[in-house]
Amino acid sequence: MQRDEQGLNVNINPNDLEDVVCEKCGSQCFEPTFLFKRLSAVLSPSGKETMIPMQIYRCADCGHINDIFLPKVPSINE
């Protein structure tokens, strides 16, 4: 795999990359799925309640969603 950015060639060997695996079953295969978030009419620019899709990935074998694929929700302490 090569990436050309501002005239620089960077060679990345796929064998050197860390595999992402399902935390539950260990599979390396994932498929896209969606979470939906509801935006209240008060916060929506249109003044109407809106559904916002967020694409995430789930394990193609067991359906588990790794924590790294879930959107981060800031805590009160952050």
Image (cartoon, rainbow, N blue to C red):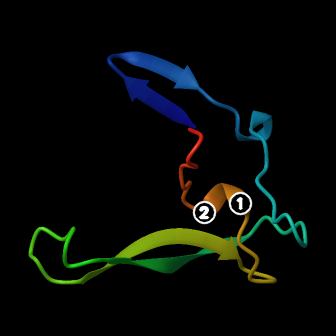
Residue at image point 67% right, 55% down: 68
Q: Quadrant of residue 27?
A: bottom right
Figure check: 29 above or below 48 = above
Q: Residue at x 81, y 60 (%)?
A: 21
Q: CA distance from mark 1 to mark 2?
A: 5 Å
Specify the quadrant of the image occupied by residue 30. Answer: bottom right
| Residue at x-position 81% and y-position 83% | 62
Task: Name the residue beneath numbered marker 1.
Answer: 67
Residue at the image point whose x is 72% and y is 80% from the top: 60
Quarter of the figure that contains the C terminus: top right
Q: Which mark is residue 41?
A: none
Q: Quadrant of the N terminus?
A: top right
Badge 1 amino acid? Asp
Q: Residue furthest left?
A: 46
Q: Position of residue 73 (x, y in %)?
A: 54, 56
The residue to which callout 2 is attached is 70
Describe residue 46's horizontal placement relative to residue 5 as left or right: left
Residue 19 in the image, given as x and y percentages of width and height: 79, 49
